[in-house]
Image (cartoon, rainbow, N blue to C red):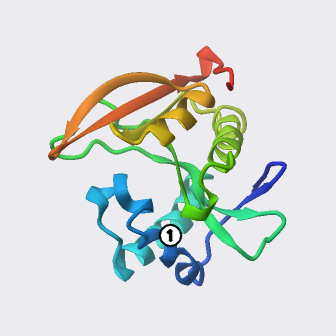
């Protein structure tokens, strides 16, 4: 679907669940996601299935992320998905699209998330014609916040979610975010 200098973003297949498992069950990767709990087999399968369905219905998803040098290796995902207000988190973003990313721990700090997110942002505002994108991070997840800022998203607000505080970053197509 999308390519960058070092990465390929591709649709999911059900057999990708096996390769995604080490990422979704790594406590360090999950530290700021879903309360830090590793995902179950059911959650992994549901995620992959949702991405496959999302691509068919929306024209985008959280694409699986592959290194061009090692195209057989799944290193995470990056993409777009509809944001849905959740009970207790009515922040008025229903209908807005979220940009997100996860990476395998051994791929952190190499610029992969920024490179992939920049391509996805361009896809969202360009080919998909979206008007607004948001990124949602745990308030302590400084690495994801840096990625959001590097691709041109700006801090919008802090919102309580359960016992946590999440930060919402956003950009609109009119603002033409300048990557940093």
Task: Characterize the local packing of mark 1: few (<14), some (14-19) or many (20 or more) Cα atoms within 10 angstroms.
Answer: many
Relative depth, front residue between 138 and 128: 138
Q: Nearer the viewer, residue 146 or 43?
A: 146
The residue tagged with tag 1: helix, strand or loop? helix
Rendered image quadrant of residue 119 = top right
Q: Could you tell me which residue is drawn at 34 percent across and 45 percent down?
A: 84
Instruction: Name the one closer to the observer, 101 or 111.
Output: 111
Image quarter hosting the N terminus = bottom right
Residue depicted at x 50% and y 41%: 143
Question: Where is residue 77 shown, x and y percent of the image?
Answer: 58, 59
| Residue at screen point 34% across, 39% down | 140
Q: Is residue 90 visible?
A: no
Q: Is residue 76 above or below residue 130?
A: below
Total number of numbered labels?
1
Q: Is residue 63 left or right of residue 17?
A: right
Q: Position of residue 146 (x, y in %)?
A: 53, 33
Q: Note whether 38 is above or below 94 in the view shown.
A: below
| Residue 82 sits above or below residue 173 on the image | below
Quadrant of image for the C terminus: top right
The residue beneath circle 1 is 23
The image shows residue 26 at horizontal and vertical percentages of 43, 70
């Amino acid at each position: 679907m999308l390519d960058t200098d070092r990465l390929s973003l591709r649709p999911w297949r059900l057999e990708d669940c096996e390769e995604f498992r080490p990422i979704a069950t790594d406590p360090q990767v999950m530290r700021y996601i879903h309360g830090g709990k590793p995902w179950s087999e059911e959650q992994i399968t549901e995620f992959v299935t949702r991405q496959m369905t999302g691509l068919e219905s929306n024209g985008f998803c959280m694409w699986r992320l592959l290194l061009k040098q090692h195209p057989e290796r799944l290193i995470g995902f990056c993409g777009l998905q509809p944001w849905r207000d959740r009970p207790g988190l009515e922040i008025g973003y229903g209908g807005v699209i979220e940009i997100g990313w996860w990476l395998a721990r051994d791929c952190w700090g190499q610029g992969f998330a920024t490179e992939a997110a920049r391509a996805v942002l361009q896809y969202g505002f360009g080919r998909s014609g979206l008007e607004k994108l948001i990124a949602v991070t745990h308030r302590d997840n400084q690495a994801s916040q840096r990625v959001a800022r590097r691709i041109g998203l700006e801090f919008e607000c802090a919102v309580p979610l359960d016992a946590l505080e999440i930060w919402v970053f956003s950009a609109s197509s009119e603002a033409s975010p300048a990557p940093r």
